[in-house]
Image (tube, helix red, strand yellow):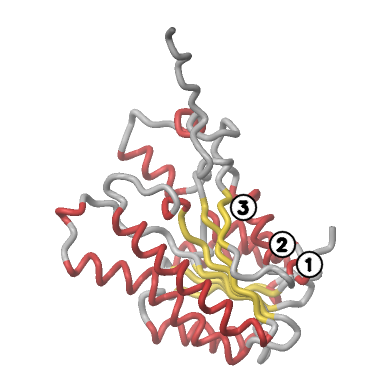
């Protein structure tokens, strides 16, 4: 199905690997022109080289930038419009994850850094991009974790920061809807990404199979499955969808894939 994304201009955060790279790949596959950024210059360069070879250098812009810096966010936007023109149709905010710590270990510095990198990043990206959003129909998509729906021990920072993103996004949807700009949020579950690999490395008792057993669909997701939903939401096919906060998690926010023991009579 043609999503109608040909020649649309997109900015994607955290686009050098994981879900971010999968979304960049899918948008390019649909014909969009995509600027993406991440902090590690070598990873950005490698991803940009592969994508340019597959889709054309004229449609890909990879930038090394730190999402916690307001100046860097403005530079990404300025570089995008310099390369692709004055219209930006799609903004995808996406960046790793806040630190996992017990509440007793959370200092003011940890909270400040997390809000700067994961909440203010969204606010600054929207502020920088909105002047270039067009009346052709703009789309803002925020990616957070499904942990906002199912808090867990040691996850106070991710739950708090991403919940703030959700509240901001829903209010933004109300304020800019009249300009034909949609604002939606996807809550990502467990996917086969470097973040999951890092979690497994820290906890050897875990594996992709054991994590997948907790998911109602019986497995963790592939990044391309997340990207397919994201691409649809930022496409003209979803022009009447805004303010949405939806899980893409194999059903995990509904419940676990574990079967409870049969009650004894």
Instruction: Determine the residue positioned at 51% across, 70% down.
Output: 93
Quick one: 202 or 44, which is closer to the camera?
202
Label whose residue precedes the other's in the sequence (1 or 3): 3
Identify the mark nearer the N-term, 2 or 1.
2
Identity of the residue drawn at 17% across and 69% down: 108
Residue where numbered disc 2 is placed:
232
Look at the numbered discs 2 and 1 and tell me whether their residues touch, using CB distance below 8 Å. Answer: yes
**Disc on the earlier residue, 2 or 3:** 3
Q: Please state, as top left, top right, bottom left or bottom right, where the C terminus lies in the image.
A: top left
Above or below for 63 versus 178: above
Q: How many marks?
A: 3
Q: Residue furthest top?
A: 265
**What is the CA distance from the residue labelled 2 to the residue labelled 1?**
7 Å
Q: Is residue 35 visible?
A: no
Residue 183: percent from left, percent from top: 60, 73
Image quadrant containing the N terminus: bottom right
In what element is the residue under mark 3? helix
Residues marked 1 and 3 touching at CB (< 8 Å): no
Residue carrying label 1: 237
Q: Residues within 10 Å of mark 1 (few under 14, many from 20)?
A: some
- Against 136, residue 257 (above or below) is above
Q: Please give the label number shown on residue 226.
A: 3
Q: Secondary structure at mark 1?
A: helix
The secondary structure type at the circle numbered 2 is helix
User: Is residue 31 in sight in this rendering?
Assistant: yes
| Figure check: 24 above or below 204 | below
Please name the residue shown 16% across and 63% down the image. 107
* Residue 260 image position (x, y, % from top left): 46, 21
Could you say which disc has been placed on residue 82 in the image? none
Distance from disc 2 to disc 3, alpha carbons, whole Å, reads 10 Å
């Amino acid at each position: 199905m043609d999503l109608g994304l040909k020649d649309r201009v997109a900015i994607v955060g955290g686009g050098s690997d994981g879900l971010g790279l999968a979304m960049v790949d899918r948008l390019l596959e649909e014909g969009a022109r995509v600027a993406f950024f991440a902090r590690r210059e070598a990873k950005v360069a490698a991803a940009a080289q592969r994508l340019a070879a597959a889709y054309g250098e004229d449609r890909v812009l990879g930038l090394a930038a730190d999402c916690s810096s307001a100046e860097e966010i403005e530079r990404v936007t300025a570089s995008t419009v310099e390369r692709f023109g004055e219209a930006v149709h799609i903004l995808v905010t996406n960046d790793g994850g806040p630190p996992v710590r017990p509440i007793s270990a959370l200092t003011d510095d940890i909270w400040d850094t997390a809000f700067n990198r994961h909440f203010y990043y969204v606010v600054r990206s929207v502020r920088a991009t909105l002047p270039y959003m067009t009346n052709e129909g703009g789309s803002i998509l925020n990616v957070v974790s499904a942990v906002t729906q199912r808090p867990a021990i040691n996850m106070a920072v991710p739950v708090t920061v991403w919940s703030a993103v959700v509240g901001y996004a829903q209010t933004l949807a109300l304020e800019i809807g009249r300009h034909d700009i949609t604002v939606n949020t996807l809550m990502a579950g467990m996917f086969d990404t470097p973040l999951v690999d890092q979690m497994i490395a820290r906890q050897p008792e875990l594996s992709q199979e054991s994590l997948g057993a907790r998911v109602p669909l019986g497995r963790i997701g592939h990044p391309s499955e997340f990207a397919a939903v994201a691409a649809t939401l930022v496409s003209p096919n979803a022009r009447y969808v805004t303010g949405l906060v939806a899980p893409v998690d194999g059903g995990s926010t509904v419940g676990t894939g574990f079967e409870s023991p049969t009650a004894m009579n």
